[in-house]
Image (tube, rainbow, N blue to C red):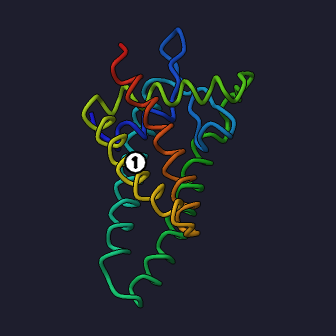
């Protein structure tokens, strides 16, 4: 259980039989029915993809400006790689999305919270709260960064609170 597996599992919803609905573009896009074996292959791909993305983000902040431009270009290539791979997977799959967006969102957050576990979910919640507090201070001082920080970290605190709630439910 960890952050990457939580992100990966949030892309799937289990059906009553041995099939899953795969949401390649998150809660906004269509869902596609895949078998258990296909789900495992897709999940393996998503784990690799997320690992490369997060490694690139860390490198983006650690390296010089010239390399940052190269890494930004790399993210573009990774996005193309993701789109090509996912479109190959879903090309002949049955489309399923009769659910409301809120129901899909709830299901996605539930899967993510249960996959990440209690420790990671609580850590994310505490991290977003710890960044919300200085943002509130900046807002009180009428700094524009305070507005942006309160909006962003307020939303992430709200979202991660649900991750914590679902991580404690079985």
**In this rendering, would 163 be left or right of 73?**
left
As drawn, the residue found furthest toward the bottom would be 66
SS at badge 1: helix
Q: Quadrant of the N terminus?
A: top left
Where does residue 116 sit, x and y in percent of width and height? 33, 33
**Above or below, comparing residue 59 to residue 101 in the picture:** below
The answer to which of 40 and 11 lies nearer the viewer is 11
| Most foreground residue, 169 or 104 | 169
Q: How many marks?
A: 1
| Residue 57 appears left or right of 119 | right
Q: Residue at the spot x=51%, y=66% of the render?
A: 141
x and y percentages locating residue 145 in the rendered image: 53, 67
Task: Give the residue at x 61% y 44%.
Answer: 25
Q: Residue at x 60, y 26 (%)?
A: 33
* Residue 115 on image: x %, y %: 35, 29
Q: Name the residue that disc number 1 marks.
A: 128
Asked which quadrant contains residue 96, the reply is top right
Instruction: Tell me residue 106's x, y (percent).
Output: 56, 25
Quarter of the figure that contains the C terminus: top left
């Amino acid at each position: 259980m960890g952050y990457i597996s939580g992100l990966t599992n949030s892309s799937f919803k289990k059906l009553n039989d041995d099939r899953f609905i795969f949401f390649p573009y998150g809660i906004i896009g269509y869902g596609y029915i895949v078998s258990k074996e296909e789900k495992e292959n897709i999940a393996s791909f998503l784990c690799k993809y997320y690992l490369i993305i997060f490694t690139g983000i860390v490198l983006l902040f650690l390296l010089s400006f010239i390399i940052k431009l190269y890494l930004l270009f790399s993210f573009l290539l990774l996005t193309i790689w993701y789109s090509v791979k996912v479109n190959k997977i879903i090309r002949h799959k049955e489309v399923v999305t009769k659910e409301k967006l809120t129901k899909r969102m709830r299901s996605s957050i539930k899967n993510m919270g249960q996959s990440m576990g209690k420790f990671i979910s609580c850590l994310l919640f505490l991290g977003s709260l710890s960044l919300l507090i200085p943002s509130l201070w900046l807002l009180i001082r009428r700094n524009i960064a305070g507005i942006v920080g309160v909006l962003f970290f307020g939303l992430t605190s709200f979202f991660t609170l649900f991750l914590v709630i679902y991580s404690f439910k079985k």
